[in-house]
Structures are given as C-alpha cells and as structure tokens.
C-alpha cells in the first residue's frame, strides 16, 4: 500500500462528525437516521457541520428510507437539497436513484450531477441493489458521477471483493470505487490489496449510553446514541497510511 489511501467516515450526528474529523478522517459522509440506512441531514445539522468542520464533507441526499425508486416530487426535493448543500459550501453530495426494474435511473442521475456541479457526486449503495452492476458502472460514468460506494453487492464488502476488483479494473481510473460495509482495521489491508482501491469507507460505529438522568420505565425507548470509535479510526489510519 505505497499510495495514499483516503479514509471516509460515515457519521450520524454533529458530535460524531467532530470526533471523526479530530481522529484523522480525510472526509465525512454526513447522514441522519442510521436505522433507515441514512437520510438527508436537516438544515440546522448541515449548517452547524459546515461551521465546525474543515475537512471535506459529503451530505447524504435521500428524502426517505425504503427503496431507491423516487417519484418526480422526491427528485425535486433531492435537487433542492443538493442546491442547498452547494449554497452552504459543501464539497460533495451522496445520492442514488434506481428505476423500478433495478436499473440505474440514468437521466435523473445525470440531471442531478449537473445541478450539483462543481460538487463531487458519490452514487451510494443503491448500487448494491441494482441489476447488471458492470453495466450500471458504465452508466454512472456516463452520467458524470465521481465515485460509487459499494460492498460488491453483498451485505459485507469482504464477501463482495471479486466484484469490487472487477469494477476497479473496468473503471480504469474513470470513476472511483469506494468499498464499504463491514470494513475495519483488521480487514482493510486485505481489501485494498485484493482490489486496488484508493479510498475506503466505514462508520467505525459504536453505541454510547445516554446521559439523561430520568427515564419513564413504561416507555421502552432505546436512548443510546450513535458515536464513532476514535481509536478504531486512528488504527485504520495507521494501517492504511503505513507504507
């Protein structure tokens, strides 16, 4: 691993974003709602992050959980949120659109990439739900996306390395292949060496106990909070940035 490997950390709240940045993340993917796979951060969340973090931040632009086929109204919302991120000075955005038959929604993707310019665009793990991934790769290159976040169409990227390697080879530098899901400091070297990727993605997620002092025991909410494992980020950096 003689080349520089970029480390992207996916976060779900302001405190986690700040901790990840301080721990050595190169870039932040900014989301809300871990349970739904990530949705668009609120205006207040976006603005606060932009004021507090100087490393590149790519907000997730996804108006709801569920499938990746979006109506015209939802696509209009995505465009408005992209334009807001541009106005707030973000470095990139993350979104993904599929048609009902599992193919990439090429036309709307291309229009949103154009609306986002000069922000970079990552096509998120909607890719792992599409059919014909190598064909989809070419469609996303043609649409102007900068990178694809993928686990190789498997729940964990360690099981999808064959496809990730195929994608890296086929892309041949035309688009960045960003592996994620189940990536950690114990397997990242194998993932990089097996595929030739130049960027990696993880949440390094842990749960921390709520500091609230009172709970109504009749209301069985989970008050624990998503956070980031700072030591894991440091360890990842040691692994990927040591020649």
Image (tube, helix red, strand yellow):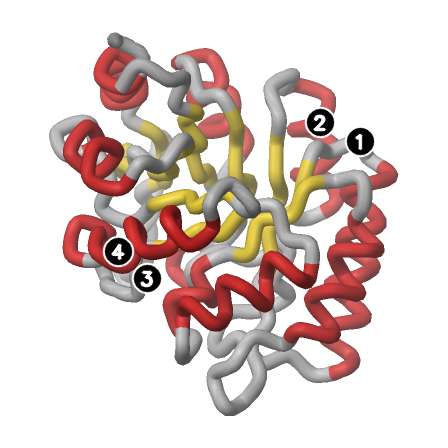
Identify which residue, 234 or 136, lies in the foreground.
Answer: 136
* Residue 15 sits above or below residue 158 on the image: above
Q: Which residue is mark 1?
A: 89
Q: Residue at x 81, y 71 (%)?
A: 76
- Disc 3 from disc 4: Cα separation: 5 Å
| Label 4 Cα neighbours within 10 Å, binned few <14 / some 14-19 / many ≥20 | few
Q: Residue at x 34, y 29 (%)?
A: 228
Q: Residue at x 84, y 50 (%)?
A: 83
* Residue 3 sits above or below residue 183 on the image: above
Q: Nearer the viewer, mark 1 or mark 4?
A: 1
Q: Which residue is mark 4?
A: 217
Give the quadrant of residue 114: bottom right
| Left or right: residue 17 compared with residue 44 | left
| Left or right: residue 89 compared with residue 100 | right
- Disc 1 from disc 4: Cα separation: 44 Å
Q: Are marks 1 and 2 in contact (CB under 8 Å)?
A: yes
Q: Position of residue 14 (x, y in %)?
A: 55, 31
Q: Could you tell which of marks 2 and 4 lies nearer the N-terminus? A: 2
- Disc 1 from disc 3: Cα separation: 41 Å
The answer to whether one can see residue 94 in this image is yes
């Amino acid at each position: 691993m003689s080349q520089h490997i970029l480390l992207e950390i996916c976060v779900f709240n302001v405190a986690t974003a700040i901790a990840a940045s301080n721990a050595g993340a190169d870039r932040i993917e900014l989301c809300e709602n871990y349970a739904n796979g990530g949705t668009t951060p609120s205006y207040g969340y976006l603005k606060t992050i932009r004021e507090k973090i100087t490393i590149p931040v790519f907000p997730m632009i996804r108006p709801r959980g569920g499938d990746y086929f979006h109506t015209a109204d939802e696509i209009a919302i995505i465009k408005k949120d992209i334009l807001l991120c541009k106005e707030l000075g973000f470095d990139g955005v993350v979104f993904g659109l599929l048609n009902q038959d599992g193919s990439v929604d090429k036309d709307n993707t291309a229009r949103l990439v154009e609306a986002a310019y000069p922000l970079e665009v990552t096509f998120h793990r909607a890719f792992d739900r599409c059919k014909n991934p190598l064909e989809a790769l070419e469609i996303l290159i043609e649409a102007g996306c900068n990178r694809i976040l993928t686990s190789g169409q498997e729940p964990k990227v360690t099981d999808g390395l064959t496809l990730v390697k195929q994608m890296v080879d086929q892309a041949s530098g035309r688009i960045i292949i960003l592996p994620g899901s189940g990536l950690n400091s114990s397997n990242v070297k194998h993932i990089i060496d097996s595929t030739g990727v130049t960027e990696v993605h993880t949440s390094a997620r842990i749960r921390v106990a709520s500091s609230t002092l009172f709970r109504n025991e009749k209301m069985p909410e989970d008050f624990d909070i998503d956070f980031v494992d700072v030591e894991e980020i440091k360890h990842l950096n040691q692994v990927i940035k040591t020649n």
